[in-house]
Amino acid sequence: MKKLSVGGLALALLVLASGNISAQEQQMTCEEYMALGNELVNRETAANTQIEELNAQLEALNMQIAQLDRANADLDAQILAAIGHSESEVVAFGRELDAITAQLEGLMALAPEVLIMRRGEVTALDSRAAELKQSNIAALPEMMDKLTTIDQMLADLKARIAQPVVIDYKVERGDNLWNISKKEQIYDDPYMWPRIYRKNKDQIKDPDLIYPKQVLAVPFGVAANQYLVTRGDFLFKIAAELYNNAGKWHKIYEANKQQIVAPDMIFPAQVLEIPK
């Protein structure tokens, strides 16, 4: 910091005062000028002393900060050594958690019927989150907070998916159950047409005959103790998915004998009861 000279300060004060003081005040004696100069010198000396003290305190604080930074760096190194991962791996782990959170936020913004159709994404994200929890990196406080948020979002999405939804669809000219089921905003799968037919048997006498302006109920999702059959499903596969034991397929068969013609014949859009 540059120091102002005593003479400079005194001159500045006198120039400033010369334009405002009265004629009587302009008649200052030499002793009064000297007294004013001494006062300014004393004030400057006190200010410089205070600046030096503050600079010393600032230097001490900077030294403490540097010591804390070194201590934090040492602690970070010890933590990385303890979990057996590098800093770049920790950063990548956090970014993946952020990406999962962003995907879940997108799913939470979907309409209920669309969310149910994309339940596979929720299941996949749930599985990935479970895998990530097995890493030692997950024990870091920052990662634990992110995983807690992900768990809360997954729980909310699972609860929403577990609630079946029914929407209305107004039949348009040229529509048939096959084409309606094929629409992306419906099932995106023409083989699911029997589900619409079963839901609307009160007004559809022949599945090949529907009419413009009919309002059909289109169901989405099933109850927690049910399973909606899709293309490629068979009892062996369903049992492996739900019970983690393909050999328990017979439990599902016994609970659904009234709608399963043979154990090796199930069809898309069937809703099976799943015994606990």
Image: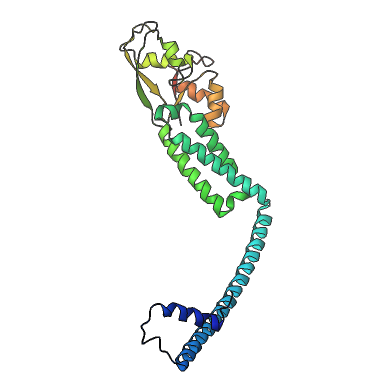
253 shown above or below 75 = above
For the point 45% across and 40% down, the residue is 155
141 shown above or below 168 = below
For the point 50% across and 81% down, the residue is 11
76 shown above or below 44 = above
**Closest to the observer: 263 or 17?**
17
Image coordinates for residue 131, horizontal then vertical, percent: 59, 41
Image coordinates for residue 78, horizontal then vertical, percent: 67, 60
Asked where in the image residue 274 lies, by quadrant, the reply is top left
**Closest to the observer: 172 or 149?**
172
**Closest to the observer: 118 or 126?**
118
Image coordinates for residue 50, horizontal then vertical, percent: 53, 80
The answer to whether residue 188 of the structure is visible from this angle is yes
The answer to whether residue 134 of the structure is visible from this angle is no
For the point 42% across and 80% down, the residue is 18
Asked where in the image residue 178 lies, by quadrant, the reply is top left
Q: How many marks?
A: 0
